[in-house]
Amino acid sequence: MNETSNSTAIGIEFDSHRPYLFKFAMLQTRNRDTAEDLVQETLVAALAAAQGFSGKSSLRTWLTSILLHKVVDLRRKAGRQQSISIDAAQDDGGAEAVEALFRENGRYVELPEDWGDPAQALTQRRFLEALEACVQGLSETAAQVFLLRDMMGLSTEEICSELSVSSTNCSVLLYRARMRLRACLEQKWLAPDDRRRRNRTRP
Amino acid sequence: MMRSCKEVSELLSARLDRKLRFMDGFGLRLHLAMCNACTQVARQFELMRTGAAELPTLEDAKRPGEK
C-alpha cells in the first residue's frame, strides 16, 4: 500500500470516531465552532502521528486522549484550568449534593422512580436531550470523567492515567457524577405527570 | 452484612467500572433481591450508560439546518 492510500484508509477509519469526538468536544467547550476546530486539529495531529499509535489502546481511546489534551490546553489558555489533575483534586464533584440524596440511615430521601422500558426510553429524543442537559449541569471535571467512561468508553485505568488522578479518586468522581445525573434525570426527564404516585418519605 | 442503600449505590457505580470483590457482589445481589429502590437505580445507571453512548447520534440529527 502506498503512503497516500494508506493515509486515506486511516482517514476513513478516523471518520467513524468523529461524531464521538465532536460530541465530547461540544459538551466540554459548549461552542460548535470551537468543537469543530478541536476535532479537526485532533484528526490532523493524529494523522501526522499515526505511527505513534501503538495499538495498545483502542483507536478511539488514542484519539480521545489527543482531543482531551487540546481541550485542556484551550481551558488553560482561557485561564480556567491549571491542569486536569489539580482541577480533579479540587473538584468536590458535588459531594454535598450526593449526601443530600440520602438520609442518615443510608436510605433514599426520595425513592428512585421506575424509568420504564429502557429500549423505549432510548428511542425517545427527549431522554437523550435530558441526559445531555444534565451532563452540562455537572462540574467540568465530573462531566469529563462521566463522558470519558460512559460515552467514549475509556477504561477507568485509562481515565486515571489521562487525568493523573488516583483510581479511588476516579471512582468517586464517577460515582458522584452518576448519582447527580440520575437525580437530575428524575427532575428533567420524568415530567410530574409521568411520576407514579408513590409514597414519598418527604412530601 | 446487610448494606445500606447508600453503600449499594456505590457498588452499583463501581460494578460498571470494575469487577466487584466476591463479598461485595454477593452483598449487592442480596440487597437488590429485597430492595426496589436500588433495583431502579441499577436500571437507571445502565440506561444512562447506554444513553451516553447514543449522545453522538443526537448531534447528527440536529445538524441539518444549522449553520
Image: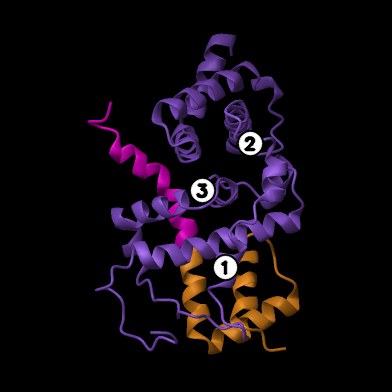
CA distance for labels 2 and 1 = 24 Å
Q: Residues within 10 Å of mark 2 (few under 14, many from 20)?
A: some
SS class, disc 1: helix
Label 2 resides on the chain identified as A
Q: Which residue is mark 3?
A: A151
Give me the chain that's purple.
A
Q: Is residue A203 above or below residue A21?
A: below
Q: Which residue appears at 36% of the width and 55% of the height?
A: A130
Can the viewer see residue A163 in this picture? Answer: no
Chain letter for orange, please.
Answer: B
Quarter of the figure with residue A44: top right
> Toward the viewer: A172 or A105?
A105
Mark 3 or mark 1, whichever is nearer to me:
1
**Chain letter of the residue carrying label 1:** A
CB contact under 8 Å: marks 2 and 3: no
Q: Locate residue A105, reporting x and y percent.
A: 62, 86
Q: The disc labelled 2 sits on which kind of residue?
A: Gln
The residue indicated by pointer 1 is A98
The residue to which callout 2 is attached is A81
